[in-house]
Each structure stands twice: as C-alpha cells, then as structure tokens.
C-alpha cells in the first residue's frame, strides 16, 4: 500500500513514516497543501493521512480540490483539533475518517484497514487475464489457482498493470507505484523489474504478455 502523509511536524512525520514502513507500506510525505496537491497529481495513493494545521492553510481544504479532480483516494484527517465541531466539519468536507491526536498506532492501522475495505467494495477483488488472476486487495497473483511467488516490487508492477490491463501505463505511474519519493531509483531499475516479471509470467504459463511501448511505458494483454 502507498500512503501520502501530509504533515509539517518533522517528529510526527518521522514516527508515522517509520510505523507505516514497518507494515510494508510505502510512505511519501508532503509538508504543505501546495506540495500535497502537486504530489497527488503525480502519483496514485491508497490513502492520505492529512494534518489540518499546515503552513499554508487548513488541511481539509485539500479534500474538495481532490474530489473536483475525480481523485477518490480515502482521506483520514489526523489533527490536534478533537472537538465535536471540528470532527463534524472534517467529515462534512469529505474526509473518510477523523482521528484526534494523540492516538494509538493500532487505532490508526485499524482505521486505514477500514477505509481500504470501503474503497475495495467499489471495485472487484479479483481481476483475471489469460490464466492469471490477481487479488487487488491482498496483492497476490495466481496462475490456474496456483500462487505465483513474486518479490514485492514485481507484485506492485503487476498490480498496476492488472488494474489497467489492455491500456498503456506510463513509466511515471509504474515508478510511483513501486518506489517512494525519497528512494533513489536507477534509470533502468523499472525495466529490470518488468523483465524479470515478464520471464516469470512466461515460465508459469500465465497466458499474458507485457509489451513495452517505446518512450511511454508498458501494456499488459492476453497472449496472442
């Protein structure tokens, strides 16, 4: 899972990022409304953890802007403003959940799971192509019912391609799905993951093909 953490306090951001990464979640950070808006347009996220007290305004003002651009990413507001009126305002503005600071890590993780479940209800759990099936919620691939063992980054590449099978996925979208913003990525790293994934799918008889679109990205379709 990929999380955007919008938090300007360094200590809080570092602690939350460490927790998320310990649960195998990619965590990117924005420190302002402007930065968050730019990052959201550049990459796809499974959830946003949003502080209200940001240097350039109230964090919840970001939510209507995201919805106006048809970005449905679930938003959990994390804030020291815990009064009932504050929670009502946040939820009425479009937040999916509201958690007052300080909070227990276990509660945050439970609320993340809850918003993911609600989002998952709007899309199929499993998508199929050829003899390959992919569970989007659990990030697991099977060929003819047999689990296909893949490293995490290759699974993330495959997940992104399966979500848009039959359509070209640009390199920037694939890289955003696989790497966090603070990672240094070599120019050929994505191509290496795709090459290894392509070989494993062929060896497993998945009945799918990954086609490279020169200068653009990759496309997944049923084998001809």
Image (tube, rainbow, N blue to C red):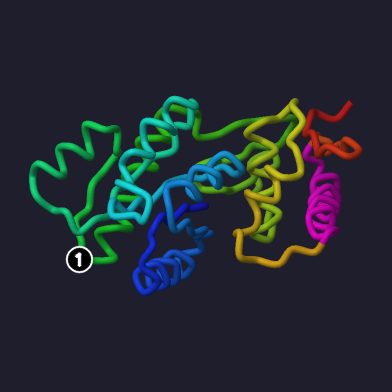
Which residue reaches farthest front?
56
Q: Is residue 69 above or below residue 57?
A: above
Where's residue 124, x and y in %?
50, 29
Q: Is residue 18 above or below residue 56?
A: below
Where's residue 161, x and y in %?
70, 38
Q: Is residue 120 above or below residue 97?
A: above
- The answer to which image quadrant residue 127 occupies is top right
Where's residue 53, x and y in %?
28, 55
Residue at (67%, 36%) from the top-left corner? 162
The main secondary structure of the magenta stretch is helix
**In the structure shown, which secondary structural element does the residue marked by tag 1 occupy?**
loop
- Quadrant (top left, top right, bottom left, bottom right) of the C terminus: top right
Residue at (43%, 64%) from the top-left corner? 20
Where's residue 74, x and y in %?
39, 40
Q: Nearer the viewer, residue 31 or 143?
A: 31
- The answer to which image quadrant residue 210 occupies is top right
- The reply to whether the magenta stretch includes residue 204 is yes
Q: Which residues are magenta?
A: 187-206
> Is 57 left or right of 134, judged from the image as shown?
left
- The reply to whether the magenta stretch includes residue 21 is no
Residue at (52%, 58%) from the top-left corner? 28
Provide the residue designation for mark 1: 102
Q: Nearer the viewer, residue 204 or 171?
A: 171
- The answer to which image quadrant residue 13 occupies is bottom left
């Amino acid at each position: 899972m990929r999380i955007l953490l919008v938090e300007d306090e360094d200590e809080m951001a570092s602690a939350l990022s460490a927790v998320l990464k310990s649960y195998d979640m990619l965590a990117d950070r924005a420190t302002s409304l402007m930065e968050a808006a730019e990052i959201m347009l550049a990459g796809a996220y499974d959830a946003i953890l949003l502080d209200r007290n940001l240097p350039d305004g109230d964090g919840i003002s970001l939510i209507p802007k995201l919805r106006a651009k048809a970005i449905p990413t679930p938003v959990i507001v994390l804030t020291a403003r815990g009064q009932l009126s504050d929670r009502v305002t946040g939820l009425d503005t479009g937040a999916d959940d509201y958690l007052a600071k300080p909070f227990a890590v276990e509660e945050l993780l439970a609320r993340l799971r809850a918003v993911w479940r609600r989002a998952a209800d709007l899309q199929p759990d499993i998508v199929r192509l050829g003899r390959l099936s992919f569970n989007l919620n659990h990030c697991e691939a099977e060929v003819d019912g047999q689990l296909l063992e893949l490293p995490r980054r290759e699974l993330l590449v495959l997940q992104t391609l399966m979500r848009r099978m039959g359509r070209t996925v640009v390199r920037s979208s694939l890289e955003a799905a696989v790497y966090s913003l603070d990672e240094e990525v070599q120019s050929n790293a994505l191509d290496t993951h795709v090459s290894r994934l392509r070989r494993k799918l062929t060896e497993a008889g998945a009945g799918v093909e990954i086609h490279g679109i020169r200068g653009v990205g990759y496309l997944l379709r049923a084998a001809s």
